Image: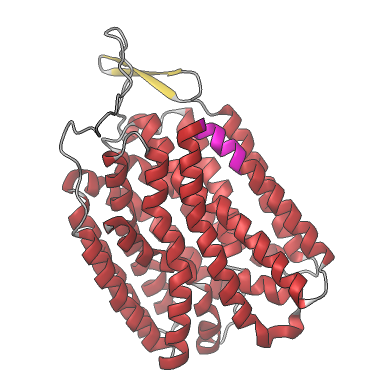
Amino acid sequence: MGALMIQLSLGSLYAFSIFTSPLSESLDYASTSFQILGIFAVAIAVFALTVIPAGRLQDRKGPRIIATIGGLVVGAGFLLASRSTENIAMMYLSYGVVYGIGIGFGYVCPLSAAVKWFPDKKGLVSGIAVAGFGAGAFFFTQIGKVFIDDYGFSSALLYLGVIFVLMVVAGAQLLTNPPAGWSPKGFAPVVRGTGDRRKIDYSCQEMIRTKCFVFLWLMFALSATAGLMMISNVKNLSIYLDPSKTTMVVAEYQTIAGILALFNASGRIGWGKISDKIGRTSTLKLMFLIQAFVLFGAAGFFFVKPTGELIQFLGLTSFASLVGFTFGGNFALFPSTTADFYGTKNLGNNYGYVFTSYGFAGVLGALIPGILAGSQSGFVYVFVAVGIASLVAFGFATMTRQPMLLACGARAVECSVADD
């Protein structure tokens, strides 16, 4: 419950598109400009980078106090943003930097604690722990739009900030790590022989020296780029299909973005559960292939640009939802894979380093549409580019093997073991 309360609030990050039109009006920039989309990209990048120190502190101090700090910082970010709606530099500082820091502090705590409580179901519990992050966009897209319409943009930011503080701080009080040596009833961890000196828990210094870490980082970055591109451009994609229907775009956007958010949340649980059955890397390969297929299909759809409001709505909704479903899987698979490969003792810190790839993906997800979507067939090129990126991620997944360090006195030697 604590994890879901926190993640629902932090998932408001994915509702950024409801702010693009008010920001465009107050700052006098186009809603698709680098200046507007860059705010979202900065928030993603700061969020990802903050997970490293937040994870380290969480491993030392426990999840409750760090998540509480995260909630207070999130509220501060929205308070500052409510006073910065006519100043783009302050909006970058408040929403991009301060809010991003708050998300980073809050995000890693429930995830790390949950995996430690459920070592026998790492994939499923990782998905459940972060499902709220995906679903949060659905709820706060609707709530945020109502607030903006009824109270104005500035007041809406303030009211949302108050809600987020209350939810995150309350959820943080429910978090705790299990006692040392705790194990769920009936769980039988793998027992190693007396001559097996493989490490169970890796430090971050040991982890980043393995090839597997590099592959995990690259796969996460390439796969997440597609989802972040879609999340931040649903409204622009709707206008791209038919520029004449701008009066209907707001209602359509809310519906499509909400459905995408639900698929994002369900993908986190679904892919996590599948990975507990067939293995992490096998699930990653399957997910990347499906994602590439969907993205190339979307490229064909936007190349044809079919006429008819219903066809356009159903097509965009279908492709956005499927991308959201595969995108969500990243947030269940990569933390559970990190826990499998490098142990749970330092999971907060170790996953923080893996998660920096998400920040890189946030920048790519904002820049690629800005660079490629300007021409007549611009979004076709965008979908082809991220589809190719998904295939490259599949290639890395085929080369990923669980690392093995032998504890040899002061030295650690990397070896290779069979996959899954």
Nearest the camera: 420 or 104? 420
Q: Which portion, as a residue range, is magenta?
A: 278-287
Q: In the rendered view, does 85 fall on the left or right side of 223? A: left
Nearest the camera: 316 or 28? 316
Q: In the rendered view, does 327 fall on the left or right side of 68? A: right
Nearest the camera: 367 or 385? 385
Could you say where residue 147 lies in the image, as x and y percent from the top left?
A: 42, 86
Q: What's the colour scheme?
A: secondary structure
Nearest the camera: 357 or 314? 314
The residue most toward the top is 195
Above or below residue 376? Residue 417 is: above
The residue most toward the front is 186
Above or below residue 172? Residue 288 is: above
Could you say where residue 103 lies in the image, as x and y percent from the top left?
A: 35, 62
Picture residue at 47% right of the left edge, 18% below the top: 416
Q: Quadrant of residue 86?
A: bottom left
Q: Quadrant of residue 168?
A: bottom left
Q: Is the stretch drawn in magenta largely helix, strand or loop?
A: helix
Q: Is residue 69 in view from this perspective?
A: no
Give the quarter of the figure containing the N terminus: bottom left
Picture residue at 48% right of the left edge, 57% below the top: 265
Q: Quadrant of residue 44?
A: bottom left
Picture residue at 70% right of the left edge, 72% below the top: 313
Picture residue at 59% right of the left edge, 79% below the top: 31
285 magenta-colored:
yes
51 magenta-colored:
no
Q: Is residue 302 in view from this perspective?
A: yes
Could you say where residue 38 lies in the image, as x and y percent from the top left?
A: 52, 69
Could you say where residue 122 lies in the image, as x and y percent from the top left?
A: 38, 38
- Tag count: 0
